Amino acid sequence: MAVFNQSRQVTIQLIFAVVFGIMLIRLASLQLFSSKYDKLATDQAILRKVVYPSRGIIFDRKGKAILDNRTMYDLMVTPSQLRSSNIDTVSLCRILGIDTAEFNKRIVTAIIKNTRNRPSAFESLLSPDKYARINENLFRFQPAFFLQERPIRGYPFNAAAHILGYVGEVDSGMLKRSNFFYQMGDYAGRSGLENFYEKVLMGQRGIQYILRDNFNRPIGPYENGQFDTASVAGRHLNTYIDIEVQQLAEKLLNNKVGSVVAIEPKTGGIIAMASGPSFDPNELTGPNARKNFGNLFVDPASPLLNRGMQGVYPPGSTFKPLGGLVALDEGLITPSFGYACFGNYGPCGRPKCTHAGGGHAANLKLAIANSCNSYFADVFRKAIDNPQYRSVEKGIVKWKEYMSGFGLGHRLGVDLPGEYSGFIPDTTRYNNPKIFGKNRWNSCTIASLGIGQGEIQATPLQMANAICLIANKGWYYPPHFVKSIDGETAEDTILNKYRQKISPLHIPDSAYQAVIDGMEMVVTNGTARNAKIDGFNVCAKTGTVENYFRKVKQKDHSFFVAFAPKEDPKIAVCVVVENGGFGATWAAPIASLIMEKYLRDSIAGDKRKSEVDRIANASIIPARIKYERFKRDSIKQVKDSLLRIKLEREQQARIDSTNTAFYEPQEEGMHLPVRVPEKKRTNTNWSFAWIPDERRLFKTAQLKANRA
């Protein structure tokens, strides 16, 4: 019996020894080889808080801050701490103006985006009122909720929205493209200079570690901030922009569709780039940014489109100086060459000319000054049919090489994303049987190219740059906004390409001088006498561009290009006013005021100031845009009415279910009539004689839109 007891005792001891050994091994594994629970404990005890840096400030050419920083706050949530915290969700929902369903939806979204244990934005960019109320009651929602400081952008001059761009929260696509350099909740430049110079402006995030007690309440910095990293502010940009000129350009484009581009010829620095219609860039910051962006996005006038570099048009007669340079360089004409124009180009039967007789095209200067279509159609044909090339195909290939040298048909590389390249046709297009069918094309069939019509497409930026090339007599710098970066080093190569002079063509100075003399005569004795500026010799060219929309002839576009002064060019301008008629009607006076403002730093005299007011108060919105806006507003009114009807019927249904005879309105302006029983009442159905039929209401709105 003693032997049996001894055997059982050994067995029990062995069992205890094995169990104890397993526990020791497991403890050693957890403490020495596994970091899982250490990480979980650290996450519970230490709050990792991101410190967002201030983005770099953008200055204009006079040192004025045209884009700066302001502070707002995000309400952050850590979902894993909601269960351990006694959160008064009802009070929080009341402060934020949401219901519990929306609260739960946001928590689920936060978990999906950033897991349970990492803080996510519950509501971004709190309004001042919400921030004050949240901050006052924050102790009731801690530690699951906390406030995160967020620098946002401010636009003190309410201008240059298309140039400066805006900042928005990164999406999944940006996360992948950045190889997850960004984190959910980060903000980055989405357009304009904010996007192009993102790496310069963004700065570097900082991290702050905060120790928490057993109730998850912050009690101070972890290890006295030994492991914290400070945020590094972004670097500033110094630009060529003159914000006062920019503001004037936007004012003059008020209630118009078009653009203004002004460049400094000697540097390629862009002084102003305005697009109409524009918008206040402050609308895309703060808590209402998404709503405002949606309204801008659906506007038929496309205010988000930067027409300065994304609007493409036939350049019309503003193209004629370039055609003259080609013919002079190839020796096809001399400055004294003239053409007897009698109202149309006889050899081809077109194009027509607005002048007839009187020697208005007796030489190149007069032809430019009077904008003779016949003269430049003939000059174009001479270039295409040049015997030196022996075929019209080779002639147009050479002609396109000249156009490319002038900066047309390809992107210029401006430091903004989304630049359009325009279009210059060549044999690839004209040899396509769908263009001319079985008929062979020749210089007559494409003679409209000589007057800047036909298939030519150019942006205002390209035309302003081409005028810089003429003003400089054969060279230009790629157009750009940024002059320098604060703290610039050898590693900052982004500006290198803008500091290289481009001399694409070797046209003699005498040819440029002949064209420049003709452009001066446009203002002194030609089609743009209203573009004069006292004390400055202005060289310019008007353009009246034929305009078709869906193959229907519309009112012509008003075009104008110019530079001044003639002797020492300091500014080159291109102005486009869609549906503005003759180039001298609207585009020329706008360009004249822009140049005067830049050259004099002011608008001199009451007469010129009254001209600013006259143009700014004129409305030239194209009829098609007015119609689209009316149709949009009509449909929106119908949808709002239908939604109101639906809500009122649902409210009445609830009243019926509780046998309530009358309904007391909850909102000012909402009045429901007394219920009117039908003549043949069945069960508990009721009808409202005042509520219109939805289909009839929608059809009526469509009929009104079609009649407009």
Image (spheres, helix red, strand yellow):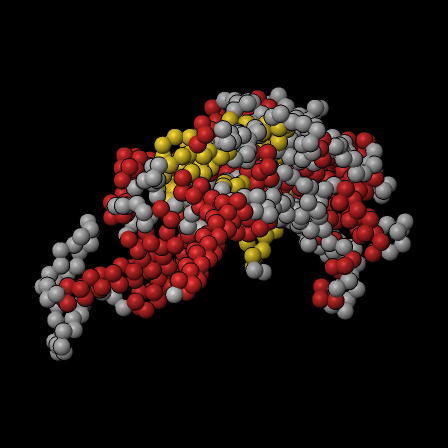
Q: Where does the image place residue 264, in percent across and percent down from the top left?
A: 65, 29
Give residue 635's quadrant in the image.
bottom left
Quadrant placement of the C terminus: bottom left
Q: Where does the image place residue 54, in percent across and percent down from the top left?
A: 49, 31
Q: Out of 153 and 596, give the one closest to the viewer.
A: 153
Residue at 25% over, 66% down: 692
Q: Is residue 192 above or below residue 520?
A: below
Q: Where does the image place residue 644, in percent across and percent down from the top left?
A: 27, 59
Left or right of residue 136, residue 481 in this image = right
Give residue 586's quadrant in the image.
top right
Q: Where does the image place residue 43, in percent across and percent down from the top left?
A: 43, 43
Quadrant placement of the N terminus: bottom left
Q: Out of 267 and 77, give the one closest to the viewer.
A: 77
Residue at 40% over, 48% down: 291
Left or right of residue 100, residue 183 in this image = right
Furthest-front residue in this view: 2
Q: Is residue 190 visible?
A: no
Residue at 49% over, 35% down: 207
Left or right of residue 482, residue 36 in this image = left
Q: Is residue 236 visible?
A: yes
